Amino acid sequence: MAQSTRVLIVEDDPDVRDSMAEYLASHGFEVDTAEGGDAMRAALARNVPQLVLLDLKLPGEDGLTLARSLRERHDLAIIMVTAADSVVDRVVGLEVGADDYIAKPFDLRELLARVKSVLRRAQPGPGAAAGAAKNVRVGSFSLDLGAHRLLDAAGAEVPLTSMEFDLLRVFVEHPNRVLSRDQLLNLTRNREWEPFDRSIDIRIARLRRKLGEDPDQPRLIKTVRGAGYCYVPAA
C-alpha cells in the first residue's frame, strides 16, 4: 500500500516537517511538504494525495480552516496534528471532518501506525473491484458499500470520512442491535485507535446530521443510554 501512496505534510516547523517527511519516505510513501495554506494549495494543484497530515497551529490560515477547505474540495483522508493538551481543538477537528488526530510530541512509529490505519479504513473492500458492490437503503439515502459512497434521494453524493463510512457500514450490517462504543471500535477495525473521552460520539453526531436526523429525536441511529447505539432501519 505504502509504495503507491502519496502523503502531504502541512507543517510550519521545518524540523518537524523534515523529520516526518524523511520517516514516511523511508517506509515507501511518496511525500510532499508545505509550510502553510498557500503552499498546500500549490502542492494539491500538482498532485492530490491520499492523505494530508495537517498541523492545527499554522500562521495565517489555521489547520481547521484548511481542513474544511480540503473536505469540501477533495476526497482524501486527513489527520490533524494538535498540541498534547488541546482537547477542544481535537473535538473541533473531528467535527470539521478529520479522520484522526495525533498529539505533539509524538513518536514517529505512532505517526506511521496512524497513517496506515486511516489509509486502510479509506480503502474499498476486496469485493469492490470484483463488482460486489451492494446498495443499502438508509432512510431516504442509498449506501453503496462497494464504492464507499452515500447518495441522497436525488443521487448526489454526501461526503463521508472513512470513519463515518465504517460506522454506517457497521450499523447497516447489524440492524436493530445495540452496539457499545467498544464493539463499534472493534467492528470498524479501529481497536488500535485510542479515542479520547467520547470522540466516537462526535463521529455519530456528524453522521446523523448528514442523514438529516433530528439531533433531539434521531430515528435511524438511536442512543441507548448506558449501552451504546442502535441502528433502526426505516419501515
Image (cartoon, rainbow, N blue to C red):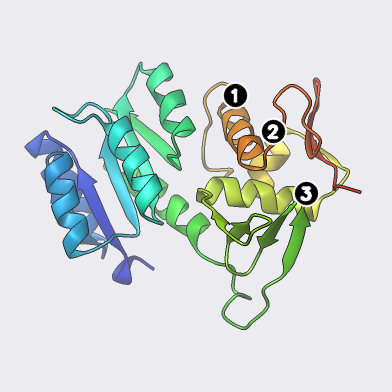
Q: Distance from label 3 to label 2 (Cα)?
A: 23 Å
For marks 1 and 3, the one nearer the N-term is 3
Q: Residue at x 69, y 41 (%)?
A: 184
Task: Say which amino acid is labelled 2.
Answer: Arg
Residue 26 % position (x, y): 20, 60
Residue 83, compared with residue 129, is above or below; it is above
Task: Say which amino acid is labelled 1.
Answer: Arg
Q: Is residue 228 visible?
A: yes
Dividing the picture into quadrants, the one containing residue 183 is top right
Q: Are the residues at dot 2 and dot 1 in contact (C-beta closer than 8 Å)?
A: yes
The circle on residue 181 is 2
Whether residue 173 sits left or right of residue 9 in the image: it is right
Q: Residue furthest left?
A: 14
Q: Distance from label 2 to label 1 (Cα)?
A: 9 Å
Tell me the residue that label 3 is attached to: 139
Task: Say which amino acid is labelled 3.
Answer: Gly
Q: Secondary structure at mark 1?
A: loop
**Quarter of the N terminus within the rendering:** bottom left
Q: Residue at x 80, y 20 (%)?
A: 226
Report crowding for label 1: few under 14, some 14 to 19, many 20 or more residues within 10 A (C-alpha).
Answer: few
Tell me the residue that label 1 is attached to: 198
Report crowding for label 2: few under 14, some 14 to 19, many 20 or more residues within 10 A (C-alpha).
Answer: some
Q: Distance from label 1 to label 3 (Cα)?
A: 25 Å
Between 110 and 64, the one lying in front of the other is: 64
Q: Residue at x 55, y 28 (%)?
A: 199
For marks 3 and 2, the one nearer the N-term is 3
Residue 52 % position (x, y): 30, 49
Q: Residue furthest front?
A: 154
Q: Residue furthest bottom?
A: 130
